[in-house]
Amino acid sequence: MGFIIEDFGIAASVFLGLYVIYNINCLVIIYHKSWKSSYSLLLFYGMVRMGGQISGVGFSIAGYTQYNWLIAYLIMSAEGYFLLVLGNLYFLIDEQFIAWGESPLKKPLFKFSIWNRPTFRSLFHFSLLPANTFIVVSNTLLQGLSGDELKTDPQAKLSNLLRIIGQTMFLASSLLVGFFTLRSYFKGIKTKTMVVLICIIPILSVRGVYGILACKIDDMNYFNVDNYIDPSLGERMTIYEYVLSTTMEYLTASLLLNIYWVKKRFNEPHLSDLRVTADVESIPMESIDHQSKREVL
């Protein structure tokens, strides 16, 4: 069966193949490291995005009248973005533990609390949950609406507003991780792994900015029916999506995954190599740069 939306179908098929390769690479790395490592999160991301590409292929075959395929694609895209931002934070925290013996992002923010004292990492998790919820709900609100209703229905307008809020929160979160990455680098963690994390900052930022613009600019908006009626508009929309969103995510995930090979090439340790406990409570003192630890504290 051929594609009704040909440009989108070809792009989704290409990235489906790329994510299959990505997931195989993930499994190889996890085999050498551990299922408890941060690489498992990257595998979960890869599986989610592979599912998204399958939904994209289904949407291209069924056509825009069957846009539930598109809703599934966008939900899995949002979940993928969510996992990438978290993964970026996890790798940064690992590098801080390796260099300093502890991470400021896992230190309690307050001296008193009824329950466990919150850390930046725990609050970061909680801040991403509503952003993720806004985007998922925004897409489910569109179920059952006709093509014309997508333009005028108040529910469609509410959906667009929720998408903007969710995408803005995701962008702010990724920029915050970028800030802490740069701060850690200039405080002394000048490893090759940190260079990789710094390279991710502009790539993930482009993805975040696009997520907001796609809600405001008709040529980028998946729920603008005109993009499927006019072939030239559909081609332009596909280019926007697969260059500014899917490619940016794939590059980010690939860079995070290739931290394994960077560490192997330059003999930089993984956190698991230091034989810490599961909750990273201690590190052999010989692995810690004491001067750097005093500076961060």
Image: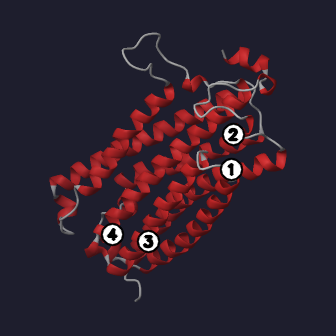
How far, Cα to Cα, is label 4 from label 1? Answer: 36 Å
Q: Nearer the viewer, residue 201 or 254?
A: 254
Q: Nearer the viewer, residue 176 or 22?
A: 22
User: In which quarter of the view is residue 285 placed?
Assistant: top right
Question: In this rendering, which labeled residue sits more in front, label 4 or label 1?
Answer: 1
Q: Amino acid at mark 4?
A: Trp
How far, Cα to Cα, is label 3 from label 2? Answer: 34 Å
User: In which quarter of the view is residue 71 placed?
Assistant: bottom left
Quarter of the image that includes the C terminus: top right
- Tags 2 and 1 touching, CB below 8 Å: yes
Q: Amino acid at mark 3?
A: Ile
Way the structure is coloured: secondary structure
Q: Position of residue 9 (x, y in %)?
A: 45, 77
Q: Which residue is mark 3?
A: 54
Q: Is residue 160 above or below residue 91?
A: below
Quarter of the image that includes the N terminus: bottom left
Q: In this rendering, does residue 221 appear at all?
A: yes
Q: Which residue is mark 4?
A: 69
Q: Amino acid at mark 2?
A: Ser
Question: In this rendering, which labeled residue sits more in front, label 2 or label 4?
Answer: 2
- Tags 2 and 4 touching, CB below 8 Å: no
How far, Cα to Cα, is label 4 from label 3? Answer: 9 Å
First reached walking from the N terminus: tag 1 or tag 3: 1
Question: In this rendering, which labeled residue sits more in front, label 1 or label 3?
Answer: 1
Q: Which mark is residue 272?
A: 2
Packing grade of label 3 (10 A; few <14, some 14-19, many >=20) is many
Q: In this rendering, does residue 240 appear at all?
A: no
Packing grade of label 4 (10 A; few <14, some 14-19, many >=20) is many
- Asked which secondary structure carries label 1, the reply is loop
First reached walking from the N terminus: tag 4 or tag 1: 1
